[in-house]
Amino acid sequence: MNNNQQKDLVSAGLTAAIGAGIITSFAVSQGQHPLVATGITVFSALLAVIIHQADLI
């Protein structure tokens, strides 16, 4: 894996984590448990990296 591919994976993960983090922080403010919100954020980031790695999008 070259440097650009590694950068793309990190970028995909960070973008997904930031997007999911914004939504889950709103959910926490509405009463959702913070651990569930963190799990959703991590799952979203990992799924984005997997989808990006598999070139599905």
Image (cartoon, rainbow, N blue to C red):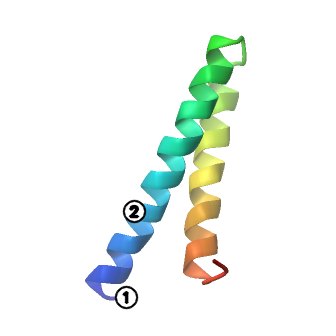
Q: Position of residue 42 (x, y in %)?
A: 58, 46
Question: What residue is shown at x 69% (from left), y 19% (from top)?
Answer: 33
Q: Position of residue 26 (x, y in %)?
A: 62, 22
Q: Position of residue 35 (x, y in %)?
A: 64, 27
Q: Is residue 13 above or below residue 36?
A: below
Secondary structure at numbered mark 2: helix
Secondary structure at numbered mark 1: loop
Q: Quadrant of the N terminus?
A: bottom left
At label 2, the amino acid type is: Ser
Pointer 2 with pointer 1, Cβ within 8 A: no
Q: Is residue 14 above or below residue 9?
A: above
Q: Is residue 24 above or below residue 13?
A: above
Q: Position of residue 54 (x, y in %)?
A: 62, 83
* Other-residue count near label 1 (Cα within 10 Å), few / some / many at <14 / 14–19 / ≥20: few
Q: Which residue is mark 2?
A: 11
Choose top left, top right, bottom left or bottom right for residue 29. Answer: top right
Q: Residue furthest bottom?
A: 1
At label 1, the amino acid type is: Met
Q: Sequence-wise, which precedes: disc 2 or disc 1?
A: 1
Q: Which residue is mark 1?
A: 1
Q: Is residue 18 above or below residue 36?
A: below
Q: Is residue 29 left or right of residue 31?
A: left
Question: What residue is shown at x 62% (from left), y 30% (from top)?
Answer: 24
Question: What residue is shown at x 53% (from left), y 52% (from top)?
Answer: 16
